[in-house]
Image: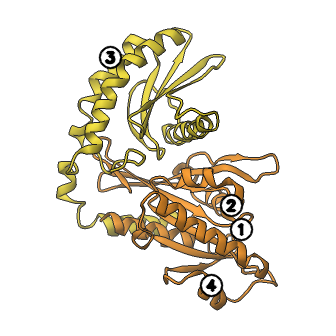
Chain colours: A orange, B yellow
Amino acid sequence: MSMINYASREINCKLVYYGPGLGGKTTNLEYVYNKVAPDTRGKLISLATEQERTLFFDFLPVDLGTIRGFKTRFHLYTVPGQVYYNASRRLILKGVDGLVFVADSQAERMDANIASLENLYENLADYGYDASRLPIVLQWNKRDLPNSVSAEELQSQLNPMGVPTYEAVAITGEGVFNTLKGVSKSVIQALS
Amino acid sequence: MSHADAIGSIGARDLEPFAPLLERYVQESGALCVLIVDRTGRLLTLAGDPMGMDETSFASLAAADFAASDQLAQLVGEKEFTALYHNGLHRSMYLADLAGWAVLAALFDSRTTLGMVRIRTRSVVPRLTDLLTALANRTEGPEEEREGMQADWMSEAEDSIDRLFAE
């Protein structure tokens, strides 16, 4: 849940990028880090392996500025996508306010997408979070690859709940901000 | 509210009892500053001088540090590690669990000792735990929350999002 700290006049919202390994979660954060005004963001912290695979999480705080007297900030996190890092994924979900599920559009990654999505719902349920009440958006990433399946196919396999979806090529930045705008506005609406 | 979770919003009055406790703690322990963060990585309050440190990132990493240590504890047959110590050349950190859902993180340098920080931490933890438990168990949110956010807050926030995340 978003924490409004009336004492320090701050609002902090936790957004988590979830999805299968090598799907582009860290790439989303790197694009945001490189594109937002430097005075609005903190350091991009990556707890990664030497091969630059996310080991624990990436973290990027982004300041929205002071709105009606409240300093409003988004905390962007990624989780490690690899199957065996579930303990880390679960820990990062604690207190989540909004989720971006980054799906890999490549046909051969469909099973990994489905497994990761199921894992997300299991982990949310473990915390007692109601996925139907949590702002969630789906990002169809890697739309530029020749082996990507159609958006309709992704929709039918991964989006039975009918949450908002965004097509993206995170490596070039296409769709990254649209996705982030979508989830952050949903979180703001949930706060009001 | 589960102890394994964060609390919701915090009112100015909620934090009033923490300030004198934490200020006294900083004074008596000789720590540079002390931060109270929740296990989701959010800063609740602090006392002392954080010396321009990035408090947001610090809170996130301190929570992650403690979360990882919880998992390590379970792997070696412990329910939890209640405190952690990081030894630096110039500055060190002592972290202690608070009520299962928050962490005290004290930053100190050579002007005090680990022993002093540890003693003072042990003495303040029960009182902070009581305060945090009361906060987690309250049945109503802070009084400011009942007034709600100003009507135009959301539209201004959405405009800011559009500006910040513009291509």
For label 3, the residue is B24
* Local secondary structure at mark 2: loop
- Between marks 3 and 2 in the image, the one whose residue lies nearer the viewer: 2
Q: Amino acid at mark 1?
A: Gly
Residue at 30%, 50% in the rendered image: B9
Which residue is denoted by mark 4 in the rendering?
A157
Q: Nearer the viewer, residue A67 or B39?
A: B39
Q: Is residue A111 visible?
A: yes
Q: Between tags 1 and 2, which lies in front?
A: 2
Gap between marks 1 and 4, in whole Å? 17 Å
Dot 1 and dot 3 residues touching (CB under 8 Å):
no
As helix, strand or loop, the secondary structure at mark 4 comes to: helix
Q: CA distance from mark 1 to mark 2?
A: 8 Å
Mark 2 = which residue? A81
Query: Label 4 near label 3: C-beta < 8 Å?
Result: no
Mark 2: give few (<14), some (14-19) or many (20+) Cα within 10 Å.
many
- Going 66% across and 71% down the picture, which residue do you hit? A115
Which amino acid, by three-letter code, is at mark 3? Arg
The chain letter for the residue carrying disc 4 is A
Percent position of residue B158, x then y: 40, 68
The residue most toward the front is B77
* Type of amino acid under label 2: Gly
Same-chain check, marks 1 and 3 = no
Q: Secondary structure at mark 1?
A: loop
Secondary structure beneath disc 3?
Answer: helix
Q: Which residue is identified by label 1?
A: A23
